[in-house]
Amino acid sequence: MDSPLYHLALLGDPPEQARAEIEQEIAKAIQAFGLRLGHEISWTLNETDFRPDERRCSAAIFFCAPHVREGHLQDFLHRGIPILPVASALNRVTEEVPPLLRPFNCLGYDITGPVRTATALLECAGLLPRQRRVFVSYRRDEARAAALQLFDELSARLFEVFLDTHGIAPADDFQSMLWHKLCDSDVLLMLDTPNYFESRWTNAEFGRALAKGISVLRVGWPDATPSRRTETVSRVELIGEEIDIVSGSLAPEAVQRICLQLEGVRSQSHAVRHKSLVSRVRNHIERIQGEVIGVGRHKAIYIRLPMDKDIIGYPVVGVPTSRTLHDAAINAAGKSVAVVYDPVGISRDWLDHLNWLGKQVSEARWVTIDEAGWIFADWEPQA
């Protein structure tokens, strides 16, 4: 592999036992994805060496590092890299956490321990099972066997896979739910068979993925002529020997190659979409003369509005749910909270549900990304 798919770091001066415990927990957790620490996932222990690719998911822990060079830290914060400040105990935050990170919700290792600390880091890098979502786009009459095969393999790697034959209940509005599921995916896995673009629905799935900023991985059948529309997307090319002419299933080596490339495309897609949301929030905040301090635990954006009003914004890559609102309210520990999301493509019924839910919950508010500056300019917590 040329470069890591994800970038993680444990920076500062953690006790040796804590470092070993956290590293062990992360390595164990990512095994279920078929990934390895130090290979597909980089593991850095020095802030001067932590130079994550902006097109990949990344996150870092700062542990017991009160005197870290602020230049490095400022760079990480400005780039929107999630930073988790950790102290040996909560009553030692002032002594052990850099001043720039003290506005964040800090972790006390005496309480969280290695499992919860590792989980918090993995969440910030988009590496929890519930964050890994892929949409399979294919023509049933040409690639059904391969689609089912990839569904099984990706599910085994703890992806949440949407396949039209598995993901929509019979009573649901099929097309509305199809677009809803697409909006909640990190990657469109396109099985490009000879007549892929001849179908209205696969054609629309491809186009709407691009419109939503969702990355596409094209898996090209050997007898399919690539469309010019796919020139800029990632691709895996199959050869004739890798497709069983009777069953239509793929050779195991081809499946493994697809899954590994999908992991890389997924990391890039998730990172770019999250960074885009953070950048758009930053632009809105700076336009009204506020400041984005940085991104912390749960990918929360720490915001300082004019008149020294501090709020926490939770950007949602995908479709927000009631759990999103609940977690934001709980994790913010009494601070003013906004859940920021892009409503384009989300089903009308779901948006109505979100609006109703928002009226019932006083601890947190929904904010659409296009209205963020307008809403934050006159921000008051809900009564």
Image (spheres, grey):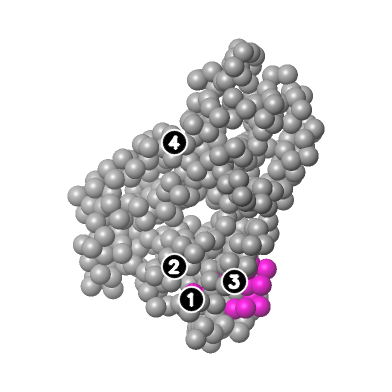
Is disc 3 placed on a helix, strand or loop?
helix
**Label annotation for residue 157:** 4
Q: Amino acid at mark 2?
A: His
Q: Position of residue 100 (x, y in %)?
A: 41, 70
Q: Is residue 168 magenta?
A: no
Q: Is residue 74 above or below residue 265?
A: below
The mark that comes first in sequence, 4 or 1, is: 4
Outermost residue toward the front in this view: 171
Q: Is residue 265 visible?
A: no
Instruction: Tell me the crowding category of disc 4: few under 14, some 14 to 19, or many 20 or more residues within 10 angstroms, Cα based.
Output: some
Q: Amino acid at mark 1?
A: Val
Task: Give the distance between the C-alpha atoms of the residues marked 4 and 3, in whole angstroms.
Answer: 34 Å
Task: Give the distance between the C-alpha atoms of the residues marked 4 and 1, in whole angstroms.
Answer: 35 Å
The residue indicated by pointer 1 is 361
Residue in the image at 28% along x and 49% along y: 22
The mark that comes first in sequence, 2 or 1, is: 2
Task: Give the distance between the C-alpha atoms of the residues marked 3 and 2, in whole angstroms.
Answer: 14 Å
Instruction: Tell me the crowding category of disc 3: few under 14, some 14 to 19, or many 20 or more residues within 10 angstroms, Cα based.
Output: few
Residue in the image at 77% along x and 35% along y: 199
- Camera-nearest residue between 163 and 68: 163
Residue in the image at 31% along x and 64% along y: 107
Q: Which residues are magenta?
A: 364-376
